[in-house]
Image: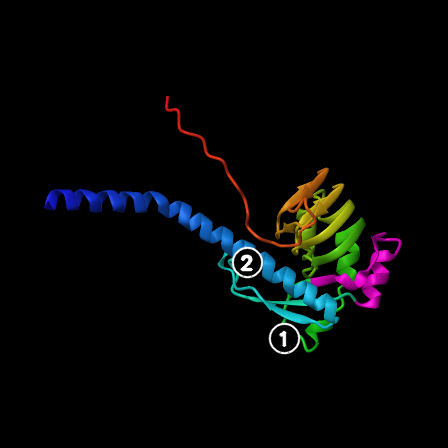
Amino acid sequence: TMNETENNNDEQEASSSWLKPFASSRQQREEKIYRTSSLYSAATACASSSIPIQWKDTATVTGSDDLWWQLRPLTSKEIQILEGNKCRCRCNDWSKVTLLYRRQREAINSQMMDWSNVLENIISDSTLDGYVVIGVSPPPSHDDIKESRGEIKGIHKNGMIYNCILEPDCVLYDNTIVSYAHIHSNASILHCGVLSFADDGSSDWTDEISITLGAESGG
């Protein structure tokens, strides 16, 4: 009958409305995972070929109009800075470590911009292994430096950083092991024992989370 049809339509609309937030959340999560997978694949390709790569950030979650990033291997000068007395960092294979920064269209040779001065201020006393992406950004202005005094900035005192993406302006401080992790800009990981996405040695950035649901008991 007409009334039954209308009731069914109302129920379907109500059900659809109830599910919309979950569908939206799932889409955002899939975009983030795709972005991580895409960036990590570009970084490993860059490290394997020793050739700078331009990476296009297609995810909407970044909220940025500038979608192009530059990935490139470290220069010998930058490696010397990282191993030197100021940074005191260790790595078995520096060829697997890449820099990530915004592509600067106005720069004549933006692919090989020297980031030595930035690196000596944002990373120290850390051991790196596997494929690691270090995000860098231009130094802050004098006013910004005065306002941020006393705050922890950068990547310092980490026992092991393994197969990770560390975006510009993230904070990684005093952690024992961080592996298979993507630390976004302005995110902070402080004083953790072990932080790892994969505990089985897998390098696949896939979304596989099983959740067991129990019957609702009411109340």
Q: Position of residue 192 (x, y in %)?
A: 71, 38
Where are the magenta residues, as a range? 75-99
Quarter of the view holding residue 168: bottom right
Residue 28 locus on image (x, y percent): 48, 52
Q: Does the magenta-highlighted stretch encompass residue 15?
A: no
Picture quadrant where residue 45 is located: bottom right
Residue at the image point whose x is 33% and y is 42% from the top: 18
37, 55: nearer the viewer: 37
- Which disc number belongs to residue 106? 1
Task: Relative to 142, say whether 42 is above or below.
Answer: below
Vertical position of residue 211 compared to residue 171: above or below: above
Marks 1/2: CA–CA distance: 29 Å
The answer to whether residue 191 of the structure is visible from this angle is: no
Residue 170 in the image, given as x and y percentages of width and height? 66, 50
- Residue occupying the point 68% across, 78% down: 108
**Which of the two discs, 1 and 2, labels the residue nearer the N terminus?**
2
Q: Is residue 59 left or right of residue 50?
A: left
